[in-house]
Amino acid sequence: GQNIDQPTEMTATEGAIVQINCTYQTSGFNGLFWYQQHAGEAPTFLSYNVLDGLEEKGRFSSFLSRSNGYSYLLLKELQMKDSASYLCAVMDSNYQLIWGAGTKLIIKP
Amino acid sequence: IAGITQAPTSQILAAGRRMTLRCTQDMRHNAMYWYRQDLGLGLRLIHYSNTAGTTGKGEVPDGYSVSRANTDDFPLTLASAVPSQTSVYFCASSERESTDTQYFGPGTRLTVL
């Protein structure tokens, strides 16, 4: 079966750095997406990785290791507005997204 | 403002009733998707459409039907609602059915009693 695993909840302090991990087992791989979802709102796109390595976009970076079935999202200089759920999704061989349950990130002052 | 709209925002429905959730996008995207999101679970694909006139089944299609008469609209119909269909429903679209980013509508919160 196909499976995406990520921690259910994490807590971090404003101004700090946090790393959210995602491991996956899917039938085929056509890229990995990270989305942000604030409570009661729609998911919004953060990043896309298809090759191994680190992609940096402002305060957010995403890393991929295809051989290990592993990705992480790194958030730097945390702000209160970063409190949200972060969703990891893998595009399988049929070009369908398989989603993790999401990691709820709580930022404390 | 370009994007995806969904209607209604929320709905309470009696079991056995028929319900259509509406989704419209103005980005001229070819591909559209319907997902449901339940607490503790990832988004699950119900149905998709790669282009106007075609539709396909996702992971959890039973009890749902869709149509894609034109590029902009992709309604989701529950023929006879059951309590297990209580969920938040998101419509999404992407330029193509490949690795293009999917953009989501604001969602419909549906409660079936």
Image: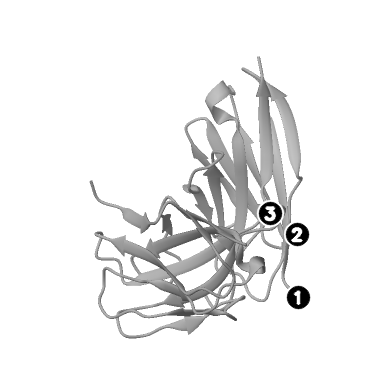
Mark 1 or 3: the one toward you: 3
Mark 3 or 2: the one toward you: 3
Q: Nearer the viewer, residue B94 or B37?
A: B37
Mark nearer the N terminus (1 vs 3): 1
For disc 2, the chain is A
Q: Is residue A102 left or right of residue B58?
A: right
Mark 1 and mark 2: Cα distance apart in space: 17 Å
Mark 1 or 2: the one toward you: 1
The local secondary structure at tag 1 comes to: loop
Location of mark 2 (residue): A68
Q: Residue at x 71, y 51 (%)?
A: A22
**Amino acid type, callout 1:** Gly
Q: Residue at x 63, y 18 (%)?
A: A14
Compared with B6, A76 (above or below) is above
Compared with A35, B58 (above or below) is below
User: At which x and y percent is residue B111?
Assistant: 58, 58
Splitting the image into 4 quarters, where does residue B32 fall? bottom left
User: At which x and y percent is residue A5?
Assistant: 75, 56
Q: Residue at x 67, y 34 (%)?
A: A105
Mark 1 and mark 3: Cα distance apart in space: 16 Å
For disc 1, the chain is A
Report the disc number at residue B6: none
Q: Is residue A37 left or right of residue A16?
A: left
Location of mark 3 (residue): A101
**Amino acid type, callout 2:** Asn
